[in-house]
Amino acid sequence: AGVLLYPFIASYQPAVEASAGYTLYNATQPPFLLGPVKSAQAGAEIHRCRYTLLGWESDTLVYQESCENAPASTWSFTPPARRGTRASAIPGNLSRIAATANELTLQSKIPYKILTEAGILRSPSGQWLAFVAQHSFGPEDVLIISTSPAP
């Protein structure tokens, strides 16, 4: 019975995790009750939403979500929040300092993609890197990782 309940009680996990000592936040982490839905989408390789990084306003990431059968929406995320919040407007003068996939300190035991076309952006403080990762052909996640290990 425990095996059958696992998908319904386990929280959703993105395709990648931070290397030891680094911190990773998922701006698109679904609420607890929707976690099993996104986990099932990952297993079935269902890809409903796409994300584009718009830029940073200080240490707050601003990104756009485009999902099937829904208008595009703008979100913001400031680490260490649990998930992004809907933004009423896109702030002006967003910082777009480009970074490369080689700067990401990640590990994974499953196939994944870093969607470089969505952008890999460094925060103005240099403390965070934002990027979009995808489970093989499944759902995407907006992720923010620290640029240096925790003390």
Image (cartoon, grey):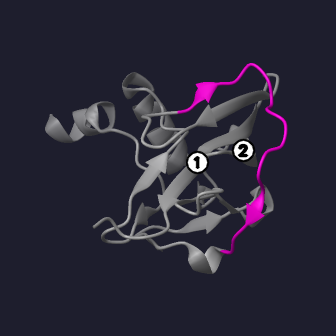
Residue 23 in the image: above or below residue 100:
above
Q: Is residue 88 magenta?
A: yes
* Residue nearer the viewer, 117 or 148: 148
> Which region shows up in magenta?
84-100
Q: Under tag 1, what secondary structure?
A: strand
Kindly identify the residue that appears in the image at 64 percent across and 45 percent down: 58
- Three-letter amino acid code at disc 1? Asp
Label disc, if present, on residue 141 of the rendered structure: 1
Q: Position of residue 10 (x, y in %)?
A: 29, 38
Q: Is residue 101 visible?
A: yes
Marks 2 and 1, how far apart at CA = 8 Å
| Residue shown at 84% from the left, 36% from the top | 92
Mark number displayed over residue 49? none
Name which residue type carries label 2.
Answer: Tyr
State if disc 1 and disc 2 touch (CB < 8 Å): yes
* Residue 33 on image: x %, y %: 39, 23
- Residue 139 visible? The answer is no
Give left or right: position of 2 versus 9. Answer: left
Q: Quadrant of residue 41?
A: top right
Instruction: Using residue 61 as the reference point, say whether residue 69 is left or right of it.
Output: right
Q: Which residue is mark 2?
A: 51
Disc on the earlier residue, 2 or 1: 2
**Is 104 above or below relative to 24?**
below
- Which quadrant: the C terminus? bottom left
Q: In front: 124, or 117?
A: 124
**Which residue does the image show at 73% across and 43% down from the upper left?**
50
Q: Are there few (<14), some (14-19), or many (20+) residues within 10 Å of tag 2?
A: many
